[in-house]
Amino acid sequence: MRTLPVALVVLLLAGCAATPAAEPAPTATYEGIPVWAGWEPSDPDSELVLESDDFTNEGEFPETIRLGVKCGGPNIRPELHWSGLPEGTESVVVTFSYDKTPENRWIAFDLPVDAPLPASADAPAEGALGMTDRSSTDFFGPCALAGEKFRLWFTVYALDTTLGLEQGATFGEVREAGIGHVLAAAELAGTITGPAE
């Protein structure tokens, strides 16, 4: 039987595992949490906190966050609310990230400072959505198959301005517009576990 050269096999496997080209995800840290490069907060004493009524920090995400394609879930974004915004905050940015790729799975910007995000599969009533690494503005929930467990996180950023970008702005456009305007940031992380094998 004819066999393929090892190098060719490696190339073929790499091609099968390829994912859509993505812009750089978080590449800096602030107080131990990952943030977008250039979005390191200027207020080190901020008391900003991001919380959810649907799960606790580092706890298991609600089942409703699961993707429907493989995991059979409704792909509903959990409720999110924040407190402790520093003085001078004009708008809020919320992102959802996954560090294995790494990957931006949801970007919402120009959110009002005093309006929490209810659990929903729809876009927020106010603000705008940026383009994710999946070339979509839709929320992209996680999926864990049998034996898998993943950690993902939401990040809230307090900005001293509104970005004023169009709906569907790219990650690069959102990041560039916010450089030098981030006052504070906070993280809310969760895990998703697949069924037992």
Image: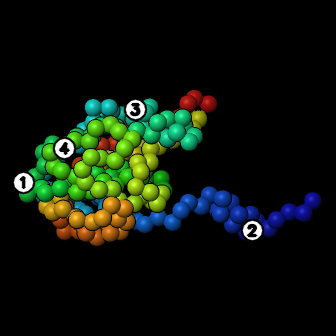
In whole angstroms, how far apart are the C-alphas of marks 2 and 3?
A: 42 Å
- For disc 1, the neighbor class at 10 Å (few under 14, some 14 to 19, many from 20) is few
Q: Residue at x 39, y 41 (%)?
A: 121
Q: Nearer the viewer, residue 130 or 150?
A: 130
Q: Is residue 171 in sight in this rendering?
A: no
Q: Based on the displayed image, in which of its 4 quarters is residue 64 positioned?
A: top left
Mark 2 secondary-structure assignment: helix
- Disc 2 marks which amino acid? Leu
- Look at the picture and state if 58 lies above or below 156: above
- For disc 3, the neighbor class at 10 Å (few under 14, some 14 to 19, many from 20) is some
In whole angstroms, how far apart are the C-alphas of marks 4 and 3?
A: 22 Å
**Residue at the spot of label 3:** 62
Please tell me whether mark 1 or mark 4 is closer to you in this view.
4
**Residue at the spot of label 2:** 8
Q: Nearer the viewer, residue 176 or 108?
A: 108
Q: In the shown orientation, is residue 161 left or right of residue 172?
A: left
Mark 3 secondary-structure assignment: loop
In whole angstroms, how far apart are the C-alphas of marks 1 and 3?
A: 33 Å
In terms of sequence position, does the residue under pointer 1 or pointer 4 come before the other? Answer: 1
Please tell me whether mark 4 or mark 2 is closer to you in this view.
4
In whole angstroms, how far apart are the C-alphas of marks 4 and 2?
A: 53 Å
In terms of sequence position, does the residue under pointer 1 or pointer 2 come before the other? Answer: 2
Q: Nearer the viewer, residue 78 or 47?
A: 78
In terms of sequence position, does the residue under pointer 4 or pointer 3 come before the other? Answer: 3
Q: Position of residue 178 (x, y in %)?
A: 23, 66
**Residue at the spot of label 4:** 115
In whole angstroms, how far apart are the C-alphas of marks 1 and 4?
A: 16 Å
- Disc 3 marks which amino acid? Pro
- Disc 4 marks which amino acid? Ala
Q: Position of residue 47 (x, y in %)?
A: 13, 46
**Residue at the spot of label 1:** 87
